[in-house]
Image (cartoon, grey):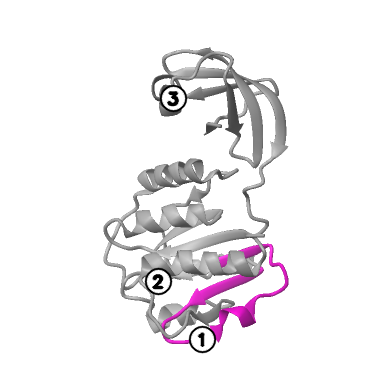
Amino acid sequence: MPRFFFTYENETTAHIQGEDAGHIARVLRMSVGDPIELCDGAGFDYQAEIAAIQKDCVTATLLSKSPSESEPKTRFVLFQGLSKGDRMETVIQKAVELGVAEIVPVEMKRSVAKGDKNERWQKIATAAAKQSGRGRIPQVSSLIYSRDVAQRIPEFDLFLLPYEGGGASLKDLLIESPKTVGIWIGPEGGFEEAEVASATGAKVVTLGKRILRTETAGPAVLAALSFALGEWE
């Protein structure tokens, strides 16, 4: 069944606007009375029925509400070293598919790319959330700098820093059912030693004997954590 995000207004009526409304009307060629699945972006899914179709707005009647089953129990936040080209876009897309709650772009000493593309990155996150059936739209936060990451480490039950210079085994650092996990991934050139040293409270981990590209490392860690914490059961 087609599934779309909408902005919650009341318990009986939903309005789907913009590109999604056009997709419903012109691409899917849906009609009044057709069933449709909606998500409020806050963790709840709705079974609904199309009540009216206009050029830029589709109105639906909400029939039932249930918690989304697609959201992980653990809140994952990915601090991604700013990378060039489409690598950031790939990381955002795949991280959203794997259940990340927030992506924080970080400009680091060895970052080749510069600047914040928050609006575009958020659109990519939203599209990936729709495609993968997420119950929430992950937030792409504003760009921060490596010196700022340490301020957020205390927010997490577990904060991981995968480092090519070596560290503990990932499986040995998992505490029982952490509710919040932060992950800091370096850019193409990796971390400088001073950046690793500045991450007070982070657990430095190894991802094995092979060095992963920056666009591979974050999704790889998210996948490993999801499996280890039972998110794929």
Compute the Cα span from label 1 to label 2: 15 Å
Q: Earlier in the sequence, mark 3 or mark 2?
A: 3
Magenta span contains residue 162: yes
Q: Position of residue 35 (x, y in %)?
A: 60, 23
In depth, the one of 75 and 209 nearer the eye is 209
Q: To which residue does mark 2 refer?
A: 186
Tell me which segment is drawn in magenta: 157-182
Q: Residues within 10 Å of mark 3 (few under 14, many from 20)?
A: few
Write down the quadrant of residue 9 in the picture: top right
Write down the quadrant of residue 179 in the picture: bottom right
Q: Is residue 100 left or right of residue 106?
A: right
Q: Is residue 107 visible?
A: no
Q: To which residue does mark 1 refer?
A: 167
Type of amino acid at the residue the image marks with label 2: Gly
Compute the Cα span from label 1 to label 3: 51 Å
Dot 2 falls on a residue whose secondary structure is loop
Type of amino acid at the residue the image marks with label 3: Leu
In depth, the one of 160 and 97 nearer the eye is 97
Q: Residues within 10 Å of mark 2 (few under 14, many from 20)?
A: many
Tally the marks. 3
Residue occupying image coordinates x 40% and y 71%: 186
In depth, the one of 141 and 34 nearer the eye is 34
Q: Position of residue 162 (x, y in %)?
A: 48, 76
Type of amino acid at the residue the image marks with label 1: Gly
Dot 1 falls on a residue whose secondary structure is loop
Cβ atoms under marks 1 and 2 closer than 8 Å? no
